[in-house]
Amino acid sequence: MAEELRLVLKNFGKINPLKVEDYLSAGGYKSLEKARSMNPLEVVEVMKKSGLRGRGGAGFNTGQKWFFAHNIQADEKFVVCNADEGEPGTYKDRIIMENDPHIVLEGMAICGHAIGATQGYIYCRGEYPGVVDTLNTAIAQAKEKGLLGDFNIEVRMGAGAYVCGEETALIESIEGNRGEPRFRPPYPPVAGLWQKPTIVNNVETFANVAQIIEKGAEWFAGIGAKSFPGTKVLTLTGDINKKIFIEVPTDTTIKEVVFGFGGGIPDGKKFKAVQIGGTSGGFIPEEFIETTIDFDSMRKIEATLGSGAVFVIDETRDIVDVVTRIAKFFEHESCGKCAPCREGTMRVHLLMDRINDGKGSQADVALLKKLSRVMASACLCGLGQAAPTPVVTTINHFGMDYHAKVQ
Amino acid sequence: MINVIIDGIKVSAPDNASILQAAELAGVKVPTLCYHPDQAIKANCRVCVCEVEGLPLLQAACSTPIRDGMVIRTNTPAVIEARRTILQLILAHHPQDCLNCIRNKNCELQALAEQYAIRENPFELMVRGLPRDTSTPSIVRDPDKCILCRRCEYACSEFQSVNALGLENRGNHAMIVPSLGKDLLESPCVMCGQCIHACPVGAIHENEEIDEFLAAVADPDKIVVTQMAPAVRVAIGEEVGMATGDMDMNVLVTALRQIGFDYVLHTNFTADLTILEEGNELLKRVKEGGKLPMFTSCSPGWINFCETYYPDLLDNLSTCKSPQQMFGALVKTYWAEKMGVDPSKIYSVSIMPCTAKKFEAARPEMNSSGYRDVDLVLTTRELGRLFRMTGLDFSRIAPGKFDSWMGAYTGAAVIFGATGGVMEAALRTVYEVVTGNELKDVNFTFARGMEGIKEAEIDLNGLKVRVAIAHGLANARKVMDQVRAGESPYHFIEIMACPGGCIGGGGQPITKSNAKRAERIEGIYKEDEGLLLRKSHENPEVIQIYEEFLHEPLGHKSHELLHTHYHDKNKKFL
C-alpha cells in the first residue's frame, strides 16, 4: 500500500504556526538565506530543473514562469500568492497556511529574489478570515526578525467570487477593479499587476520552493511522476469513508487514493465515479482508476489533477442531478465578461435542468455537446473553458444515465 | 514586419499587429462585435475567434498578437461552429423586433446574424423584460437589447471620463447600468451621446422626436421654423446615401422646406453672433480683471460636464448661451417682430448633431423670449429619417435660399462645427477688434485637426493671448484640472464634449471611427474657404441686429436674451 509523503506539510502538527521560532528551529528561512547567496538566475535554473509545476491547476513549469519575469527589465515586479482557494471541495491551501504560514512566505521571498521583486501579495479567500490573521501574524513576526529582508508581503482578501481564483481576475481584484479575467497574451509574468511583470503561484507551489532550494532540483525531480514530480495535497470528499486530506507522490493512482487512503466507499456500496481537481474537473469512471494522478496522465483520460479535490460518488447517486448542480454553480460564478461563458453557462444549466427533470430530448444532449465544445475552445478564461467538462465527461462515460432521463 | 499565413495567404504585418489587423492586410474579413477601432481591445464577444496552428484553443483575432510564421485559419468548421453558436447565444438573449428597432439596418448584430445565416435558434428566446430608461430628454437606454460588448462603458469612462455607465452584477445577470444603479438623469451622464456611437445595437439611442415634428407640421396654427447647426450639412449626406460632406447647402434648404418647414434659418447666424458676444466678453474679462481663463459655452455636453464635475469653475464659463439657444431666444422676439408674427405661434425646431442639445433646450432657464425658446431638437439622424420618409431624390432637388434676418452667416460660423473652430472664429474677430487692422490670413491652422489638446499664444499688437482647445471630455479634464490647480497658463479655452467637435456629436450618423470624423472636418473647412465672408463681425445680418435690436455686444438686450447662468448639479455622490 502506498504511503503519504509529507513535504509541503512537513511541519504540519509539529510546529506552532503562530511562533516563527518554531519554524526557524525546524530549519525555516535557511533556504531563503541560501537563495540569496545565489545569483537570481541560478535560483530560476534550480526551479526549472526541479520540474516543479504549478499546483493551482494549470500545471505550468514554475521555473519557466519565473524565468519570463526574471528576464524582463522593469522598474517594479510583483510576487502574488494565489490563496483564493474557491474550488468546491478543496481546502489544501487552508491546511498549509493555517499550519505553516512561513513556508509560503519563504517561497514567495525566494521568488522575489529570483525575479527581482520586493513586493508580494497574498490574495486570500474572503471566507478565510482566520487564515488572514495567521498570515498577518506570520508576516509581522518575520518582519520583526528581519527574515524577509527587503521583501514586503501584504495580504488582500477576496470577496467570494470564484473567478477571482483565475490569476488575471485576481490581479484585477488586487488592483481594486471588478474581478474579471484579462485576455492573454500578455501573460502576467510579462504584464501582470499594474501591468508589471508578476508571478502568480498557488499556495502549494510556493510551499514547495524552500525545500527545492534546500535539497536541490535532482532530489525533487526524483519524487513521484517524472513529468510532474513532487507530491500533491489532496482533499477527499463525497461518498468516501475517510474524508481527509493527504499528501502523496504524484505517481500515486486514483485507486490508491480512493480505496487506499480514502478507505473506499461507505456502506458497502459500489464506486460510480470520481471527480478530481474541483468542480470543473472531469468525472472519471471505474475503468480509469488505475491512472496516476499526475497532470499528464490525467490529461490523457480527459481529466485533470486541478486543485487536488477528490470528490467520490457511489452507485446510488444520480450523476445527471450532480452535474445539474454543478452547472448551476457555473452559471452563478460566471463573471459575465465574455459572451460564450456568460450565455453558455446559463444555457448549459437550463439544458441540464430540463434533462434532469425528465423533460429533455436527445437533441438537448446533442446541443449540450456542441455548446460545450464551443465554450471549451472559445471562452476568454479557464472558467468558461472548463465549465462544460463535467457535462462532457459524464455524457461520454455515463451516457446511459442521460439516456434514461431523456424522452 | 512579421510574416504570417492567413487562410493560405502570405502577409507581412507590423510587429505589434493583432491577427485581426494582419487579416485585414491579407484581405480576410474577420467578424467582430466588441472590437472598436478607436477603443482598447476587450476580447469579450469572442466572435472573432480563429484557429492558430499549434494552439489547442481558438484565439480571439482582436487580442492575439501575431508571431513570426504563425499559421492562422479564420474559416474552419470549428471556427464557423463557434461563431454561429456564439451569435445564437447572444441572439437568444436579444429582442427579435428588428423591424421597429431604431438601429434596423444599421446594427452590427443584425448584420452578423445575416452574414452567418442564423435562421432557427436552438436556444430558447429569453428576453429579460428590463424597463427602458427614458429619464433624460436626450438619451434612451434599452437594456434588453444590450449585448454587453462594453463599448459604451469605454466611450463614457475612458474617452469621456464621465463614468456614467458601468457593469453591475455578474454572469448572466450582468448589465450595463448608470452609476450606482440610478437612472441616467441622476447619474453623472452629460448626454453627449458618445455611447450611442459606440453601441453596436439599439441598446442606447437618442430620444427620437420625429412624431412631435410631424404633429407640428400638421398643425395649421403653427409656424414651423428651423435652425440648423453647421456640423449637420457635412454629415447628413451619410444618412441619405451620399458621400460625407457632399450635401449642397442650398439643396438642403429646399429639402428642409419639402419636409414641412415654413422658414429655413440657420444656427450659423447666431454662431456669428456668439463670436461678437463671447469675443467682447473675453476682452472685457482681460481688461477688467475678470475670471480667467474663460471657457467657451456652446457645447451643452461640456456644460453638463462642468456643472457636474467642476462646479467650482462655473464662473470661468462664458455666460453666452449656445448658438442654438441664442437663436431660440431671438426667433420668438426679434424675428417674430420683423416678420410681424405672433411668437406664440412659432414652433422653433433646431437640427443638431447633438443629443445634449435636447437637454439644453429643455432647461427651465431657456425661456427668455417668454416662451420655451427652442421647442424641439432633432438630431442629424432624425433628420435623415425624415428625409428618407419623404423619398426625396437629392440629385434632382433645385437649390433654395435661406430665409431672411437670421439666415446669413460667415465662414467663421461654419467652422464652429469642428474642434478649434470657435477659437479660430473668435480670433478672427478679436484680432480685428483689438488691433484695428485687417486680418489678412484668416486661417489659424494651429486650431485645426484631431489632436486632443491644442494650444497657442497669439500676439494681438502686444497683447499676448494664450489659448487652448480640447475636444473629448477626458482631454477637457486635463485642461480643467490644470485650471483647478491654479496652474493654467491660458486666457481662453475652447472645449467641445465630442471627439472632433460637433461633427463627431452624439446625434450624428452612427460613426465608429475617427477617420470618418476627419472627413467631416475636411468638409467644414472646405465650406469656410468657399465663402466670401469669413469673419463673424462682417455678417450683414449680425451688423443689422446690433443696429436695430441689440444695440451693442454685452448690452442690456444681449444680457436678457443671449446670456445665461449655470448650476452646480450637486451630484454629491460623485
Image: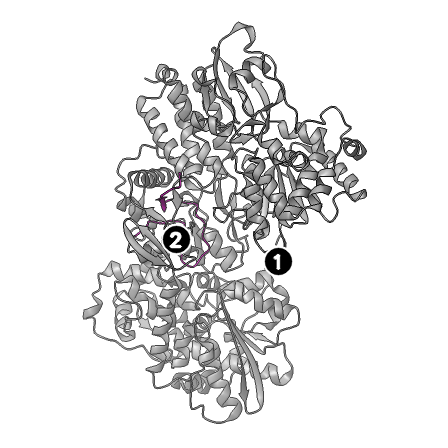
Chain of the residue under the numbered disc 2 shown in the image: B
Q: Quadrant of the N terminus of chain A?
A: top right
The segment highlighted magenta reads B29-56
- The three-letter code of the residue at mark 2 reads Asp
- Magenta run includes residue B126: no
Left or right: B438, with A7 as reference point: left
User: Dots 1 and 2: beta carbons under 8 Å?
Assistant: no
Q: What residue sits 56% from the left and 9% below the top?
A: A266
Which is nearer the eye, A39 or B291?
A39
Left or right: A363, with B301 as reference point: left
Compute the Cα span from label 1 to label 2: 55 Å
Say if residue A262 shows up in the picture: no
Discs 1 and 2 share one subunit: yes
Compared to residue B220, the image places residue A159 above or below, namely: above
The residue positioned farthest toward the bottom in the image shown: B437
Q: Name the residue under label 1.
A: B570
Which is nearer the eye, B490 or A123?
A123
Compared to residue B201, the image places residue B487 above or below, namely: below
- Magenta run includes residue B51: yes
Q: Quadrant of the C terminus of chain A?
A: top left
Q: Mark 2 points at which residue?
A: B68
Colour convention of the picture: one colour
**Corner quadrant of residue B75:** top left
The residue positioned farthest toward the left in the image shown: B396
Dot 1 or dot 2, earlier in sequence: 2
Q: Where is residue B524 in the image (x, y as percent from the top left)?
A: 36, 74
Instruction: Tell which tag, 1 or 2, sits nearer the viewer.
Output: 2
Q: What residue sits 50% from the left and 93% below the top?
A: B436
* SS assignment at label 2: loop
Magenta stretch: helix, strand or loop mostly: loop
Q: Where is residue B11 in the image (x, y as percent from the top left)?
A: 31, 56
